[in-house]
Amino acid sequence: MVRSTNDFARLIGFSVILLVACMGFAHAQLFETRAKQAYLVEAETGTVLYAKNENEAVPPASLAKLMTMELVFSAIKSGRLTMNDEFVVSENAWRTGGAISGTSTMFAELGSSIRLEDLIQGVIVQSGNDACIVIAEGMAGSEPNFAGLMTERARQLGMETSVFGNSTGLPHPDARVTMRELVILARHIQAAYPEYYRFYSQPDFTWNNIRQSNRNPLLNANIGVDGLKTGYTEESGYAIVSSIDRDGRRLFLAMSGMATERERAEEARKILEWGMRAFERRPVFAADEVVGWASVYGGEGGSVPLKAKGPIDIFVPAANADRLSARIVYDWPLQAPLEEGAQVGHLRVWIGETLSQETPLYAAAAVGKGPIHRQALDALQELLLGWM
């Protein structure tokens, strides 16, 4: 079972809730947005700056194209595809996502062959549904097969609930995503594929003699936005996944449920600007500093020191001072023997009532098995605590 260290502090004799409140950190500032769902994260530290219904599932709309591109980028990086590979435009792709469909399209001609690099720009810059379907059919034989790969890949990236029904984001009864998981995806794309991430800030692309501008309204706002994708469905409204890189700081935002395109642009810009100016970076633990201790069952010693793999910093509100609290959480009891460097828990940090950061913690020392009498005492303690 999962236990927080404070569950046993009184009984097993070490501190559980980390007293970082005395550092004078701030309480999350009040912020209002007209978005129904929103999630804002600082990239380097993973600090959650704002969260509103971030785990509520909604139709992905064209935001699904982020996962389509992730599969493409992964295949190129692994050598399974190249930018010069060509894909044929099928009648299904032409009818479902081409000019005849009345949806966003790159105007691919029926039966033509298109280089993958051009299809990528058709997807990212022009939001072409035809380009998505051409890629899906070329990589997986059919769009349903490709959608299955999208959902499978989502699980591999830590997206535990999102489901994709097609490569385009066109209405599908089973397709659902959350803002939290879209930020996970966006952060991964930017970190894993920097050589391809540049396409998200490309201002325009011309295909079939038709020039189309990038649909991201924030690219021309001169505030540091360099991606990623907009979307719309009648069911969930206007949505966006965006990233801003300014003054050495990068933020990722996913939000949905706006009523108009203008409202989407205004709300996204407002929350990104707020995230940039309203928070400041503070150190919590230095590199190699012991974060806390965890009890070990049947070990030579009763506990093991825990460390992160580097320094732990967090972004906190620059005003409205209040308390920051943190807690070590791990599966109790840890079993001896325990190897040094084994991941054994997490440090969770709250700003006010918001879980703002979660950092893996590792055993800072090895713990061998203790003598028989020590194991017997630990077994008795486990039994007593189990009754409680």
Image: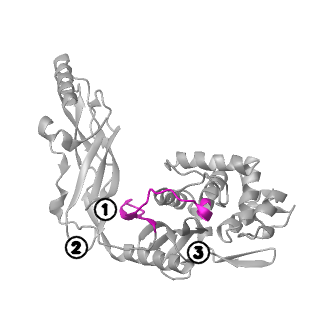
Q: Which residue is mark 2?
A: 320
Q: Which mark is residue 325?
A: none
Number of the front mark, 1 or 2:
2
Picture coordinates of residue 213, whole percent (x, y): 67, 78
Q: What residue type is disc 3 on?
A: Asn
Q: Amino acid at mark 1?
A: Ile
Circle number at residue 314: 1
Q: Is 354 contained in the magenta span?
A: no
Q: Earlier in the sequence, mark 2 or mark 3?
A: 3
Under tag 2, what secondary structure?
loop
In the rendered image, which quarter is residue 12 located in?
top left
383 versus 32 height, above or below: above
Separation of residues labelled 1 and 2 (CA atoms): 16 Å
Q: Are marks 1 and 3 in contact (CB under 8 Å)?
A: no
Task: List x then y, in percent, for residue 184.
Answer: 48, 56
Task: Give the mark, 1 or 3, whose residue is nearer the N terminus.
Answer: 3
Q: 65 and 189: which one is in front?
A: 65
Decide: few, some or many residues near mark 3? Use Cα within 10 Å; few <14, some 14-19, many ≥20.
many
Callout 2–callout 3 Cβ contact below 8 Å: no
Q: Which residues are magenta?
A: 36-64
Q: Is residue 365 visible?
A: yes
Q: Whole-percent x and y of residue 225?
A: 51, 75
Mark 1 surroundings within 10 Å by alpha-carbon count, few (fewer than 14), some (14 through 19), many (20 or more): many
Gap in angstroms between the C-alphas marked 2 and 3: 34 Å
Q: Residues within 10 Å of mark 2 (few under 14, many from 20)?
A: few
Q: Which residue is mark 3?
A: 216
